[in-house]
Amino acid sequence: MALDAPQDMSLSRVAMKAELLDAETERALAYAWRDRRDEQALHRLITAYMRLAISMASKFRRYGAPMGDLIQEASLGLMKAADKFDPDRGVRFSTYAVWWIKASIQDYVMRNWSMVRTGSTSSQKSLFFNMRRVQARLEREALARGEDLDRHQMRQAIAMEIGVPLHDVEMMEGRLSGSDFSLNATQSTEDEGREWIDTIEDEGEHASEIVEAGHDTETLRGWLVDALSSLNERERFIVTERKIRDEPRTLESLGNELGLSKERVRQLEAAAFQKMRKKLESQSKEVHSFLA
């Protein structure tokens, strides 16, 4: 069993030299921890089965996680098993601990496989750790029968074999198709250091769009000033107070100030807008089509 670092080798040697517990001693240690919280008994129990944790951790190296981290997670699972083990059930501690160690390692592998959460349900875990193995077996069996399964048929076969929904298989297939990579990584040696992030389109306005918008705004402002200048003083006052002020005035308030009825102010406002419209339409065909 190959390990990653000297401390892992040291831990492995210590684990291999640990005592082998018989069923009676194991049960006595479990009782001592459960009933009296005897830490020496707990330490002895965990140390005796550390070789089991390391052995199980080594089986998950193919997922790319550091061996030291896998051993740490396996140790956490072993400690959880010791804390929850009930010796009265008549089950060996090693049998019980296997499930906690495996669950702890699997959770770690899935958390670190991708920045995108791979999944945490039982069906997703089963897919993550069994999908490739099941697919390889189904491909061999299909080949032996002389069949050629397309991708959809293979996904259906995997879903039926593992007992999960088809959409879970499709989702997991995408997650397992490749690992994450940095956007700052170069695309290739031929691109003179061009990074992947350079290919992402900027969602903000481009410089050309900003310049065009500014030019259009200035042009429109000039047209509006010109259109306002075509009005007489009273019409210009009404339009300014009704449409240009931050807080537009009511027809009634303008009528009181000008000594006119509310209806007359409305008529003058409509007439002023009609004058401005004609003036703006004469400026550009685009404005004419917009106002039409």
Image (cartoon, rainbow, N blue to C red):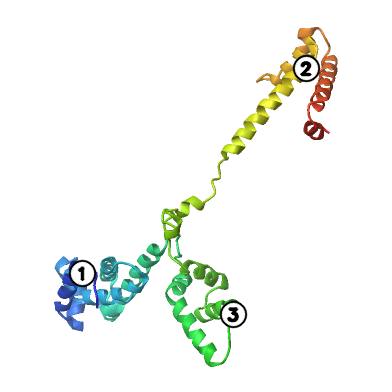
Q: Earlier in the sequence, mark 1 or mark 3?
A: 1
Between 12 and 199, the one lying in front of the other is 199
Residue 269: quarter of image: top right
Around disc 2, counting alpha carbons within 10 Å, would you say few (fewer than 14), some (14 to 19), or many (20 or more)? some
Q: Nearer the viewer, mark 1 or mark 3?
A: 3
| Residue found at x 62% / y 30% | 214
Circle 2 residue: 251
What x and y, as percent, mark residue 3?
24, 72
Q: Nearer the viewer, residue 255 or 81?
A: 255
| Residue 203 location (% of width, % of height) | 56, 45
Answer left or right for 194 relative to 64.
Answer: right
Residue located beneath label 1 in the image: 8
Amino acid type indicated by mark 1: Asp
255 is higher (above) or lower (below) than 69: above
Q: Badge 3, how many Cα within 10 Å: few under 14, some, many 20+?
A: few
Horizontally, residue 111 falls left or right of residue 4, namely right
Q: CA distance from mark 3 to mark 2?
A: 73 Å
Residue 218, label in figure: none
Marks 1 and 3, Cα distance to the nearest angstrom?
44 Å
**Can the viewer see residue 188 in this picture?**
no
Residue 141 as seen in the image, left or right of residue 280: left
Residue 174 visible to the viewer: yes
Tell me where residue 225 appears, x and y as whole percent: 72, 19
Q: SS for tag 3? A: loop
